[in-house]
Image (cartoon, rainbow, N blue to C red):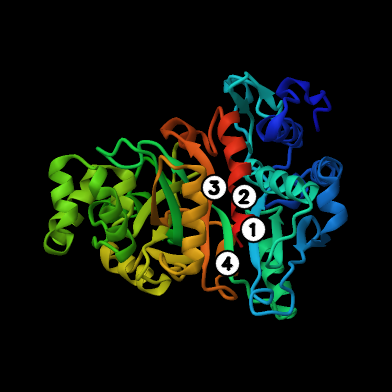
């Protein structure tokens, strides 16, 4: 249950970083862990979180319209000064979610995952980066601006989800609610990219990577059947062997590579900061697209994933007994579908790779890749200007996200959907998301608040 220890460990230092850290420390203590099994969700923790939010941000809760969506998600509306005008009718939606993934082995953490403990440099805990930190940055900015008497030019909505880590149904419900009310956002901004250090080999400057699209996400069950029996008389190519052969064929036949326009633009923007050989190659990308695509596939797992649909076999199931032949064997293939590919085309390609009609394929769940938002125009320029003002050291670039966010639910009602968390994250920080020792730098948390203040003032 919720740890009610005081939030003093995060400090109540003056300034946005100190206030944000103290609030985030308290909110991390609520175990708002998502699960697809309703009985495993601690409803009281979610309700406690929402109650704490209203206490920590009184101006936001009194000045903005607020309603619950789908039970425990929140939708705020901040009326703009241009209501009824062209600008006023094209609002902005800022998104975040407050549910988190399980902490795993809590003993493996340097500091307890739900203690909200600060060491003076970082605030530790599950959700600090994904995604309570972003929610706090949004609300801290709004609270400060309200205190200064500020009103945005456009209507601004805050959509805070409670089940992004599982179904994402609350974001879908929020998008449906806005559609029902005739609201078509001018801009949607959710979590996603960040100010990433070490984002690209050979580029020392941090990169503010803004997701302009998401790969599709597809889970396919591979199933083989066999009569089973005693393990002392095994048949040739039984259920497990047939499944294993299918998996090795998938592993040995990766999907074809290509370099999407978004990735090509990212390389163009990295070019001036890359080592000399790469700088020349990036400057001549139109001529060298094929070899650069090949190179990208071999620089590392992240760059390889930028160039193709990827398949990862994640779960395996066979016989329940050590001396019993499996009557059925199953595997789950988690697939991230490249922009330009489709669910149907991906499944059909898997069938051709496996080349065995006795391996049954069943789509468990699948989403197509999202549309690609423009990386030019007024919405993009607003983001670019706000990032540059907050992180002047960063190279700003579009990219295609490998994972999924709640924002994909808004692509049907908005043409400009972006994914960016205004936090500096090095390789270790990015690796801690959904893993052990998740933490956020207090300094970057404060910069995140400034980013949202800047963006809201520039509307």
Query: Residue 168, image x and y in percent?
Result: 64, 59
Could you tell me how far apart the alpha carbons at marks 2 and 4 are, in whole angstroms? 14 Å
* CB under 8 Å between discs 1 and 4: no
The label shown at residue 187 is: 4
Please name the residue shown 76% across and 32% down the image.
26
Query: Residue 232, image x and y in percent?
Result: 36, 40
Could you tell me how far apart the alpha carbons at marks 3 and 4 are, in whole angstroms? 15 Å
User: Which residue is under mark 2?
Assistant: 452
Could you tell me how far apart the alpha carbons at marks 1 and 4 are, in whole angstroms? 8 Å
Label 1 sits on a secondary structure element that is: strand
CA neighbours of label 4 inside 10 A, class few (<14), some (14 to 19), many (20+): many
The label shown at residue 421 is: 3
Query: Residue 389, image x and y in percent?
Result: 50, 47
Q: Residue furthest front?
A: 149
Label 2 sits on a secondary structure element that is: helix
Q: Is residue 192 visible?
A: no
CA neighbours of label 1 inside 10 A, class few (<14), some (14 to 19), many (20+): many
Label 4 sits on a secondary structure element that is: strand
The label shown at residue 388 is: none
Q: In what quadrant of the picture does the C terminus appear?
A: bottom right
Could you tell me how far apart the alpha carbons at marks 3 and 1 are, in whole angstroms? 11 Å
* CB under 8 Å between discs 2 and 4: no
Please name the residue shown 44% across and 49% down the image.
326
Using the image, determine if residue 330 lies above or below residue 203: below
Q: Is residue 374 left or right of residue 85?
A: left
Q: Is residue 281 left or right of residue 272?
A: left
Nearer to us in this view, 431 or 101: 431
CA neighbours of label 2 inside 10 A, class few (<14), some (14 to 19), many (20+): many
């Amino acid at each position: 249950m919720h740890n009610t220890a005081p939030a003093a460990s995060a400090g109540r230092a003056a300034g946005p970083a100190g206030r944000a850290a103290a609030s985030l420390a308290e909110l991390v203590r609520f175990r708002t862990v998502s699960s697809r099994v309703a009985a495993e969700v601690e409803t009281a923790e979610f309700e406690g979180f929402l109650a704490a939010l209203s206490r920590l941000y009184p101006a936001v809760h009194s000045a903005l319209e607020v309603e619950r969506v789908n039970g425990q998600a929140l939708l705020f509306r901040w009326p703009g000064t241009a209501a009824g005008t062209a600008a006023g009718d094209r609002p902005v939606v800022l998104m975040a979610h407050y549910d988190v993934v399980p902490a795993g082995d809590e003993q493996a953490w340097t500091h307890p995952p739900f203690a909200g403990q600060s060491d003076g440099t970082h605030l530790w805990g599950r959700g600090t980066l994904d995604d309570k930190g972003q929610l706090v940055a949004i609300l801290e900015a709004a609270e400060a601006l309200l205190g200064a008497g500020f009103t945005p030019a456009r209507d601004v909505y805050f959509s805070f989800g409670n089940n992004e880590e599982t179904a994402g149904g609350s974001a879908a419900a929020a998008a449906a609610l806005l559609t029902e009310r005739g609201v078509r956002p001018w801009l949607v901004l959710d979590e996603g990219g960040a100010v990433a250090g070490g984002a690209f080999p050979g580029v020392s400057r941090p990169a503010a990577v803004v997701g302009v699209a998401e790969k599709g996400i597809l889970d396919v069950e591979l199933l083989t059947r066999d009569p089973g029996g005693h393990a002392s008389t095994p048949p040739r190519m039984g259920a497990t062997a047939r499944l294993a052969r299918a998996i090795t064929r998938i592993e040995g036949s990766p999907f074809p590579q290509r370099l999407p326009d978004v990735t090509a633009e990212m390389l163009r923007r990295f070019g001036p900061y890359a080592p000399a050989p790469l700088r020349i190659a990036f400057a001549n990308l139109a001529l060298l697209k094929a070899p650069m695509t090949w190179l990208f596939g071999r620089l590392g797992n992240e760059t390889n994933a930028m160039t193709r649909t990827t398949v990862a076999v994640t779960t395996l199931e066979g016989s329940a007994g050590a001396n019993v032949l499996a009557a059925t064997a199953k595997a789950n293939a988690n697939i991230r579908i490249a922009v330009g590919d489709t669910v149907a085309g991906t499944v059909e390609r898997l069938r051709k790779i496996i080349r065995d009609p006795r391996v049954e394929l069943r789509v468990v769940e699948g989403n197509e890749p999202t549309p690609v938002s423009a990386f030019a125009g007024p919405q993009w320029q607003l983001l670019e200007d706000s990032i540059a003002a907050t992180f002047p050291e960063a190279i700003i670039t579009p990219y295609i996200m490998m994972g999924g966010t709640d924002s994909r639910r808004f692509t049907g009602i908005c043409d400009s959907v972006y994914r960016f968390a205004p936090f500096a994250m090095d390789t270790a920080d990015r690796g801690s998301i959904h893993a052990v020792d998740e933490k956020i730098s207090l300094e970057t948390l404060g910069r995140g608040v400034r980013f949202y203040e800047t963006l809201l003032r520039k509307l």
